[in-house]
Image (cartoon, rainbow, N blue to C red):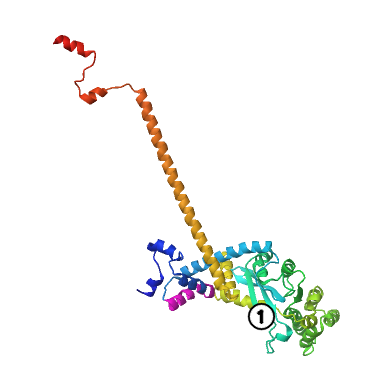
Amino acid sequence: MSIRAALIVGTAFFPLDELLDLPQTGLMPHAHQSLVRLGARLPFEEAASELHALLGIQVSDSLVRRQTLQAGARVLVMQTEQASAACALVGEGTEPVACRLAMSGDGAMVPLRGGCWAEVKTVVIAEVLPAHTRHQDATDKRTINHSCFSRLADATTFADLASVEITRRGIERAAAVCAVQDGAEWLQGFVDGHRFDAVRILDFAHAAEYLGRIAEQGELAGQHVPKGWLRAMLHELKHHGPERIMKHMAWWQEHRPLPAVSDAVRYFGKRLPQMQYQEFQTQGWPIGSGMVESANKRVMQARLKRAGMHWEPANVNPLLALRDALCNHRWEEVWDQQHQRQREEHHARRVQRSQRRRAQLEQVLEEQLIEILLLSARGKAKAQQTPHKGRTEGQKRWGRMTFSRKALPNRFAKM
C-alpha cells in the first residue's frame, strides 16, 4: 500500500471515519493538522509542495487554502465567543500572573483586493524582568514571555476581542502594568478599557522621529544645525526628561520657525507625563515598543504581506487567528479546541439531517394515511349513493340457479 493510500481514507468508509474520529477532509488527523499548519506559515502553493515533500501527500493549493481558512474560521468564532465570556469575567483567570507586565499596541497595513489597504491592530503582552535578573549583553533584554493578539477590526471591536488574551495573561490581576506605545488616540482608549492605571510611556523611537524631522527640515531650509545636535537632544530626553527640550524648541520656534518644530511642540505638549524616560528607566520599565513592532513582522507581515499578495477582507482574520496560535506557541492547545469544535459542528449537522429526514418521512406517511382515509371515505359514500346492480350474494355463492321465494311457487305449479 502506498503512503497516499495509507493516509487518505475514501468516502466509502464512513462508519470507520466516525469510529476512528477522522476529519471530513479525507486526510488522517496528523496529515490534516500538518496541512493547516503549513498553510498558516507559507503561501498555499508552497504549503502544498511542502506537504508532498514531507508526507508524500499530493494535494492542490485550493485544498490547502480551503482547509486552512476553514480551520482559522473555527478558531475565530471560538475566540469571539471566549471574548464575550472574558468581558463578563474581568479579573478572573487560571494562569499564574507575573508581578509586573508590559503591554504594547500598534497597527500595520495589510493589502486587500482592489488595491485597498486596511489596518491590522496588534497588542503584545510580556513579563517585565527585574533589574537584577536582566541579561547583561548588548540587547539589554527587559521583557520575556511575549504573547500577541492581532485582528483586522475597528478600535472598539479590537478592544473587546483582545479581552481573551488580556484575561489569560492577567493584565487586570498584575500588581503593576506599563503601556508602551505611540500617541494614537485609539491606543489610549484601549489602555483605559483594560488597565486605566497603567504607567503610560510614549515610545522613545516615536518621540525621536519628531526631533529628527526638526534637524532634517532645518538643514533643508539652510539653517545652521550644529553637528551632533540630534544626538545631544536624544541623550537629554532619555536621561533628563523633556523639560529642557521643550524650552529649546520654544526658542527655535521663535527664532527659526519650522513646521516640524510646531508639530513637535504641539505633540510633546500633550504627552509630557508619558516622556519621563529617566523615571521609567529607574523603575525598570521598557521605554521602547520594539516588541509590538516585532510582532507586526512575525504575525502579519511575514505571511500576509509577501510579494504580490492581496487578500479578501473575510480571509484576513481566520489566518491571523492561526498565526497568533503559532507565534504564541499554543498551537496544540488551539488545534485541539478547534478540532473539538469541528466534531461538535459535524455532530450537530448529522442530528439536523436526521431530524430533517425524520420530519420528511413523517410528512410522507401522514400524507399517505390521509390519502387512504379519503379514498376509503369516498368508496363508502359511493356505495351508499349507487343502487345495487348485478348478482346477489346468494347467486355469487351458489351460481345463477339460486331460487327466490317468488319464483318457487311458479316452478312447482308447472311441474
Say above or below: 133 vs 192. Answer: below
Looking at the rendered structure, the secondary structure element under dot 1 is strand
Q: How many marks?
A: 1
Say above or below: 189 vs 142. Answer: above
The residue lying toward the viewer, choosing from 17 and 47, is: 17
Say above or below: 336 vs 391. Answer: below
Instruction: Give the image location of residue 335, x and y in percent.
Output: 54, 69
Instruction: State left or right for residue 414 relative to residue 393.
Output: left
On the question of residue 221 being in view, the answer is: no
Instruction: Give the image location of residue 399, x and y in percent.
Output: 20, 24
Residue displayed at 49% across by 73% down: 34
Q: Is residue 50 magenta?
A: yes
Decide whether the magenta segment is chiefly helix, strand or loop.
helix
Residue displayed at 70% across by 76% down: 98
Which range of residues does the magenta coloring cover? Answer: 38-55
Instruction: Give the image location of residue 384, x and y in percent.
Output: 36, 24
Q: Is residue 99 magenta?
A: no
User: Which quadrant: the N terminus?
Assistant: bottom left
Instruction: State left or right for residue 134 relative to residue 410.
Output: right
Instruction: Give the image location of residue 380, x and y in percent.
Output: 37, 28
